Each structure stands twice: as structure tokens, then as C-alpha cells.
Amino acid sequence: MAKTSRIPYNIKIQKRLYYSRKLSILTTFSAIIIAFGVAGLFFTIIGLNPLEVYSYIGGVFASPTLLLESFKRAIPIGLAALGLSIAFKMNFWNIGAEGQMYMGMLASTGIVLLHVYYGLIPDYLVLSLMILAAFLTGGLWCCLPAFLKAKMKVNEILTTLMMNYVAMYLVDFLIYGPWRDPKGYGFPLSVPFPEYSKLTVMFGEFAYGGLLLLCLTAVIVFIILRYTKLGFELKIVGENIEIARNAGINLSKVVTVGGFIAGGIAGIGGLTIVSGIIGRLRPRASPGYGYTAIIVVLLSALNPWLIIPVSIFFGGLFVAGDILQATLRIPGAAVEMYQALIFLFIVIGEFMKRYKITITRGVVE
Amino acid sequence: MSIQWVEQVLQLTVQMGTVYLLASLGEIYAERSGVLNLGLEGMMIMGAATSFIFSIAYGHLPAIFIAAVVGALMGFILSILAVDMKLNQVIVGLALTLLGIGLSGFFTFPEIRKNILLKLNPSLPEEMLLTQQAEKLPEIPIPLFSNIPILGKMLFSHNVLVYFSLIFSILMWFILFKTRIGLTIRSVGENPSMADSLGVNVYMVRRATTIISGAFASLAGAYFFIGFHPFWREGVTAGRGFIALALVILATWSPLRAILGAYLFGGVETFQYRLQLFGLGAQSPYFLAMLPYIMTIITLIIISTESIKKKIGAPASLGIPYSREE
């Protein structure tokens, strides 16, 4: 017996030259399952039955009303992720989707207030102006770090992230201050949005109109990345900045414009929160959709079509989180934890895709 | 503005700055060896959560120790992902940050925390199980020195972790720039293949510095919670880990300059609280709350200008995984 244990294990790690689509799908799904397993471990530690938790999560996707709710949550997440897919394509690490969403909310609420308080804008123009304003404001919020990166190589991870906090406090300031609804009994809420300024005008149900908006945006992003000069330049900038420079691509222009579009789409994502899900502005209106979008976009490997189903899955997790909190008294942070675990194992899966590990036992000659 | 007021502001500045100092000390080592630890925020908040739970269950010293261990563990995970698996350090760091935020929120949720506390220490009284705050680390004024006007309060009447951070920044500066170990760490961050050919175990050095950075980040979180602001709410560190990351650049990867940078940022934050007390911005504390973040952005812009950039050189292989050509 003692002798057999002496035989060493040989772990050999080789770089794969290519990997199949099958392997890619397999690693993604195993990442999700392993994340379930590890989260289950944590649930067991605190004395909960993980199977019960999972049945609630699975139940979200089985019940039509809850599925519809997941679609709603998926819309801001998916829009932010679509914006990020453009940013990440050019290696612009935009962690600021959350802030850009807050700026989108702020701009669209601003338009509504202009209309309600001052009657400046005719009813039929309100929604389109809101979309425009959300796009511009979100875009500008992302444009600044993009410009700084392009011109001065300022680290965009840190600037976009810091700007999240600035945007959040800006919304706090307005909603606790000048934008508070005078008839709102002192709650930090804006006036409720009038019907024609909500995204429900299209189909009577936000989920359908929102999904349409999401799909349309996916088409636009796909076209931009695939068929336009800008998309081509974005890709080259992302793949090899030296080649881009030698090819005479105007780096700062590409990064700034790309950043503007990315932030703008996230801004519209913010609009869908106030004008679709909530119907008014309140502080901390996004429970971290902008951060979830980072996971979504990396999980979908920057593919705009995949972003839609993946964000529905993550939207469902948010709904499941609410239900778990109400029924099993599990904190909402359980969803964040679970998302982060999926993210972590997807990242590890990336290693499995790139390298082949073989374990043999025996003496190597 | 009396002397007392100035003394108090300076004391708070140092106390606030210590959060940034502790976090950046470890990060400086990691980045000097070529590993970008973007999980700093996650490790920091895990440190805060750990110190929260364990200080209630076992008291301060075990809490600080366990927080450091938890951080080292997260650093170890990062080292496997970033050093051994050679994954993208930005993505890996973000994943760990999100994980830290999620886990800390999960385990400190009142009912879950109650269960954990009962398992850790069944003899805890009922009110300790649901409290949202911990006992603050006691201040230990150094006799004689603490009576010096102004400087006494600023430097010599703090809790033990503040002294620790100051001693360690000098010690870590010395190790990094005056000893062989430091030379090895820096060479690994500048030119890993050269270091490798000279017989340095690049992976081992990077693993070690990453674990150190995890432990220090977590210690910073623990200090922030039990040493400075012992009231728990979700996301209590509020992006301070990322501010520390900016600080590392400002300090040009030197532990000594990190002291100045940390107190600068600590000063800005203290200033903001003080202004609120003065009634400035009483109607809208939100603008003042933005101050540290805006300050960080401005700092990043200033240190990115050409003339300054020439003077500071980031470690040449920062963020680039090393793999041996075979």
C-alpha cells in the first residue's frame, strides 16, 4: 500500500490551440451549476435547505407572472450590458454603467418635471425627448472618462467607478431637495410620471415595449459593431492599439465616440427603470443593475444576441432575490453573492477553455 | 477656530487616512511585483464584515487577526486566478470585489448574523446578537508625547492599528527599497523573464505579494469598521478600496509617500464631515459626500499629465501575467 501512494500524479497544463463551441457552452453551464453548489454550501452553513432555495429560484422561471417580472428587470440590465459590449470591445473597462444609468434616470426625470411643473413640452413629445435626454446625459457621463483615457491615459476603471458615486449622490441631492414631490408627504420621491411619459404607452405592459426596445438596441449594436467603420475601428483599437495607431485610426475620436454610445445606451437603461419599472424617480433606484451588466456582458462574450437571454436569467435572479427575502428571510445580498459566484466560475471556466489539463499517474521517463 | 478644533481635525485626518494607508501598503507590494489587485474593495469590505461579527463574538484582537486571515485567503484566491491561471487581472479583481460585497452583505444580514454569532459564542446576551454596531477599538495615547500641542493629538493618541500602519509603512518602505527581498519584488514587476533567468521564482514572489495585499486590504476594512466607524450598514466601505487604488498611483508605488497621500485623502473626507457640522451644506450633504470621489478623479487626471507621468514610472509589467516560454 505504501508503495502505491509513492507513484506521483503528473499534472500537465497545455495551451489549447482552439476550442469548440461545445466546450464553451459546457464550461458556461458548469460554471452556473458549480456556483449553485457553492452558494448551496453557504445556505447550508446558515441552516437553510439549499433545495428549498433553489426551488424558489427555479419557480421564477416557471410562473408566467414572475417571468414577466424577470423580463422587466432584464431590460435595464440588458441595455446597460449592450452599452458595455461596445466599451469592452475597444478594451475600455467601463465599470460606470451604474452611474450612467443614474444619469439617464436623472435626465428623463428632468424632462418630465419640465413638462409637469412648467408645461414646456407638449404631451406627445415628452417620451421621445426623455429618451434623447437620457441617451445624451448617459453618453456624456461616459464620454468624459473615455476622453480622459484617450487623451491622457487616465485609468478608466477608477474614473468610471468614482463617477458612479458622484451620479448617485447627484440623484440623492435632487430627490431629497428640489425635485421632491410637494404632495409626496415628505418622502424622497419625484412626482409620479404621467401615463404618456411611461414606456407602457406602447403595449400597455412595460415588459413588451421594453423587450422590443432591448431587441432593437441589440440590432443597432450588432450593426454598429459589424457593418460600420466605427465598429471596425473599435475592434482594432481593442485588439491591438499599435496596429490601430499605425493604420492611422484617430484613437481619441474612436474611444470618445465609442464611450459616448456605450454610456448613452446605459442611460436609456436608466430611463427604463424610472419610466418603466418604478414610474417615478427615487434614490437608489437601481439595485446594482449596472454591475450585474458587467457580469452579463462577459458571460455573453460581448455577443449582443446572447445578452438578451442572459439578462433575462439575471433579471430572474433579482426577482428570486425579492421572493426569497419575503418568504425565507434571506437577504437580497444572496443574489449579489450568487451573481458574483457565477462570475468567478465563468472566469475560471475561461482558463479551462484556454488550457487543457491532463492528470496522469505514474513515473515520467 | 480654536486649537482644540485644529487638533481634532488633524486627529480625524490621520484616523481616516489610516484606512487608505493600510489598504495601499499591501497594494503597493502587489503592484510592484506586477499584480494588479482590483479586488481591494471586496477584500476591504470582507475585512469590515469579519471584524464586525468576530469583535462581537470574541473581542477586538481575535477579530483583527481573523479579518487579516480572511483577507489573506482572498488574496490567495486572487493569486491562483491571476498568477497561476494567468487570467485577466481586471476581470478577476472585479469578480472578487463583487464577491466580497455579496458575501459581506449576506453574512451580516441580521438573522443570518444572529445564527452565526450563536454558533461562535452561545453565551452572548440577546442584545449583542442583533446590534448593528461594535465596540470601538480603544485609543492608547502614548504618555508624554500625546501632550505635545497639536502634534500630540495628531500622531500620538490613536488606537493600536494607526501606530501599526505608521510603523509598517516605514518598515515596508525599507524592505522594498533597501533590502534584497525588495529588489527581488521590484525586479519581478519590472522584468519577470530577466528575474526568472536569474533564478527568482516569479510565481512565488507574486503569490506572496498578492496574499500580503489581501491581508492588508482586509485589515484596512477591519480598522475602518472597529477602529473608526463601528456602525454597520451594507456596502459600508463605499468605494474606499478603489480610492486606495488611485492613491497607490499618487504615491508612485512608495510606502512612504503613501502616508502623505493617505492623509491627504483622509483630510478631504474629514473636511467634508466638519463642514457638515458647521452647517455648510446642511441642506444638501450630498454635494459634500461627492468630494472624495471627485478629488480622486482630479488626482488621477493630474498624475496623468505628461510632465508628471515622465517622473513616475509604473512597474513595467503591471497587470501582465507571466508565463515562461518553454
Image (cartoon, rainbow, N blue to C red):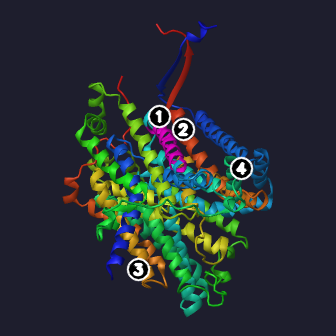
Res B85 label: 1
Q: Name the residue tied to disc 2.
A: A348
Give the residue at the far front of this rendering.
B144
Q: Amino acid at mark 2?
A: Ile
Q: Quadrant of residue B152?
A: bottom left
Circle 4 chain: B
Determine if marks 2 and 4 fall on one subunit: no
Q: Position of residue A299 (x, y in %)?
A: 57, 47
Q: Secondary structure at mark 1?
A: loop
Residue at the image point whose x is 47% and y is 28% from the top: A17
Question: Quick one: label 2, few (<14), some, or many (20+) residues within 10 Å?
Answer: some
Determine the chain carrying the residue at label 1: B
The three-letter amino acid code for the residue at tag 1 is Met
Residue on which disc 3 sits: B275
Disc 2 is placed on an element classified as helix
- The span from disc 3 to disc 4 (Cα, nearest Å) is 44 Å
